[in-house]
Image: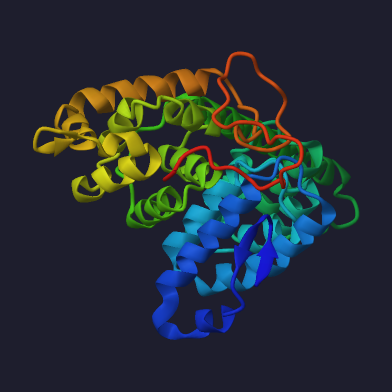
Amino acid sequence: MLCVLGYVVTNRFRELERPQTGRLKDVVLMATVTGFESLRIPSKSDMRQFAELFEPLFLGSSNEARRQAAAALSQCPHVPEAVALLIGNMPISIAAAFLTRSKAISDRALVSIIREQGAAHAAAIARRENLSPSLVDALVEHHQPASLPERPRAGAAPAAQETRAAASDREEKLREDIKALARAGTRDRAKTPRLQPIDELHCALLMRFARNGEAVLFATALADALGASRDLAERILLDVSGQQLAATLSALAFPAGDMDRLLVALYPHLSERLGGSTRAEVLIENVDRQASVERVEAWLRADAHEGPARREALFAENRPADPRRQETRPAPTQGTSAQPQRGFGRR
């Protein structure tokens, strides 16, 4: 057995090389990403391990899984430079979210991508907030005509000066256009994203993490499916009645046949029977999808207005004390081994 980034992975990684296990690669890729995201401040060893594990999984996964991984890492404050370059040089359909949002990628890497990739990559980078002078210069250089003006002949000094003045004016206008594009991108990001139905990959991840009682990974995957901060996902999970999670899953169009098993896995008391049904089944029957969509979209608007949330995991061992939150697990007593406790799951 091999422990990678705080969770256990078997030695049977050779199975991932088989063509028929593409789906397994997708799941392992997202589990690796969510495990890395749960580290509040990754060490150099964590960063190196993640970079080494990420590349073969990323390159061997489907385009949909690559897009999801890139979008998740775009919100992560710490990403190894090799991973950032790998994602940034992917086709724009995969790299767009990362190039536009990630604060972990360096200006040096972005300049390299602008010079090596096409106009679509440059346009995505131009939509970033707070473009540095070096990035603006690289974007201007990218938009310059490939051929330089013909060198003026002797005696044509006034014409040369006019050419230089016109070129300077065009460059200044281009700078203003790039800045305006960046400001427009900021306004677009300020709008609340529309709630999208959950995809098959996130369904599989949520079911897996719920069954295993992996609360940190479940919260991260739920936040990614919502396009929200993990703080919002954690607040949803803290409602032990299951009503908020049921409303969220209904708004995401989570498969009804699996919702009962997921709720029971997270909140075991919902398996109690009331007449001919369980508490979970009664809860699901009473959820109105349209009302749930409106409710969750209101949460997303409030979450967006709060600004960038702290990326400290609610269930992390080294989180600071917060009197507003009720602890979901008891502290280990002296004389007992320091085994990690689950915040949710079967007991």
Q: Is residue 51 visible?
A: yes
Q: Is residue 180 above or below residue 100?
A: above
Q: Quadrant of the N terminus?
A: bottom right
Residue at the (59%, 22%) spot, across then down? 307
Q: Is residue 203 above or below residue 27?
A: above
Q: Is residue 123 visible?
A: no
Q: Looking at this view, is 65 or 175 the one in front?
A: 65
Residue at the (33%, 30%) spot, across then down? 242
The spot of residue 159 in percent (x, y) is 80, 44
- Horizontal relation, residue 151 to residue 273: left or right: right
Q: Is residue 310 above or below residue 207?
A: above
Q: Looking at this view, is 276 or 88 the one in front?
A: 276
The spot of residue 258 in percent (x, y) is 25, 50
Q: Quadrant of residue 44?
A: bottom right
Q: Looking at this view, is 197 or 86 the one in front?
A: 197
The spot of residue 303 in percent (x, y) is 49, 22
Q: Quadrant of the C terminus?
A: top left
Q: Quadrant of residue 180?
A: top right
- Horizontal relation, residue 137 to residue 289: left or right: right
- Horizontal relation, residue 155 to residue 346: left or right: right
Q: Looking at this view, is 313 or 103 the one in front?
A: 313
Residue at the (25%, 41%) spot, across then down? 253
